[in-house]
Image (cartoon, helix red, strand yellow):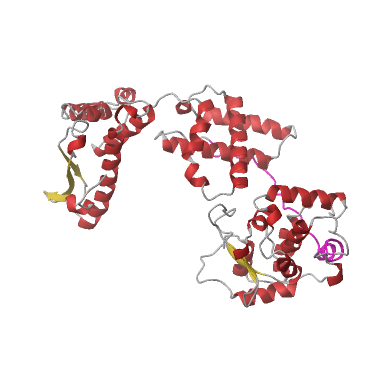
Amino acid sequence: MARNKSASDRITQRDGIFYYVRRVPIALAHLDERGIVRLSLRTDSWVAAVNAAVDAERNLEALWAALAKGESQSAWDRYKAAISRAQLEGFVYRSAAELHDGPLVDLVKQSKAAVGRGSDKSARRALLGAETPPAVTLSDLFAAYEQVTVPGQVQKREDQKRRWKVAREQAWREFIDCVGGEVEFADLTRSHSRKYRDWLAARVVGGHITPETANKHMMLVSSITSTMATEYSLDLPSLFSKLKLQSIQRRRPSFTREHVEKVLLGAGALSGLNKTARMAVYLAVETGMGAEELCALRQEDIRLDSLVPHVRLTPRTGATLKTEFRERTIPLVGVSLLAAKQVPAGLERYFDKAASMSTAINKYLRSKGLLPTDKHSLYSLRHSFQDRLNEEKAPERMQADLMGHAFSRETYGDGHPVAQVRDVLAAMAYRFDLAAIDLC
């Protein structure tokens, strides 16, 4: 909505208190009949008033935008507009039933305020709690959730988007199968979430899922409900607070140095894999990268011409990292440097196909007896990388940076020089017979 003045230009002062004052645009006069909007900023501090005026202006313009939609507004739009209007009038929005059942003084105050708004219909409806949340069942909620979360998916690869949706859709389907799809979203209570928790616990006891999986599903359902409660301005209880199932933290096993050097890097060990998959294994050996990170590498990320050859992991359009901490620089040494030279443009065959690549590699490693136990996998190379950093007594900050973990203390500066990191990685690198490495 166009305007020539800033929020601070619309501040006036009366009796020591600052106010935000603005004339209702002519085009909206039939929707907001106040003529001139005068909102107390509730402060005598100019600095605080300027900040409050910015918020007041944002809320006012959001209200006008909603009112301008007219009859095209959905029931949820009208409900949220009523909440915003009540706030602008200086009240917390309450439904008519809540006002009736609440303190008499609140009912009297808001009723008087509504009478004072004359023919301003939107103000009266907001002050008298005339808008109620429309009925949205749990069965209908997921589609709305997908729409709300579209902006957050922009930076994800197609494979990431698919797995993001599948995980949440599965958890949500379980939830509504357990508590009932016709339950209205606004009516959710802790009893529903406890029922779901108990259902998951029974599946854990039956050996169908692990406690970790159960907790993950509760986390996903909680994320959906909290996101939509915020979107719909609903005051839902903390549905899953303190419902987490106890679990034993199982550390994924790592490979011993001997196993990597004599088995995985042994003559002909990986010859049955296609070249791209072989290079992926070799790249993982001395970098600790996971499959998603390996498959996200592009030519600009593999910097072989640098004084210290390295890969740079950064989020970009169409590719997000697993966590905010995993953006990092990893020097290339040993067999990983050799592999990078073979695929300078990245693992093109598996671009955005991390799951397919992991499945192919793990299936091959198992079928050839190259894994010491059924608990080991390609990902075990990442744990081996961490173990070797510990053995090399690499500084904690360096370890956190290389692994992409959060550092436990406040960080300053850019971390260790890349040449210093390269020297640590070179010192702990696996030994191998060059003739045994299949680079073709």
Q: Quadrant of the C terminus?
A: bottom right
Q: Is residue 105 above or below residue 361?
A: above
Is residue 191 left or right of 403 when viewed as pictured?
left
Image mark count: 0
- Which region shows up in magenta? 240-265
Residue toward you, 254 or 268: 268
Residue at horizontal 49%, vertical 41%? 149
Q: Is residue 332 above or below residue 354?
A: below
Residue toward you, 393 or 11: 11
Residue toward you, 199 or 310: 310
Is residue 7 left or right of 214 when viewed as pictured?
left
Residue at the far left: name it.
15
Q: Position of residue 197 (x, y in %)?
A: 61, 32
Q: Position of residue 45 (x, y in %)?
A: 20, 55
Is residue 28 left or right of 180 when viewed as pictured?
left
Q: Position of residue 382 (x, y in %)?
A: 71, 59
Q: Is residue 48 above or below residue 228?
A: below
Residue toward you, 281 or 208: 281
Q: Is any part of residue 433 visible from this angle?
A: no
Residue at horizontal 60%, vertical 46%? 158
Q: Does the magenta-highlighted stretch encompass residue 264?
A: yes
> What is the magenta segment's predominant secondary structure?
loop
Q: Is residue 399 above or below residue 117?
A: below
Q: Does the magenta-highlighted stretch encompass residue 253?
A: yes
Q: Position of residue 1 (x, y in %)?
A: 27, 44
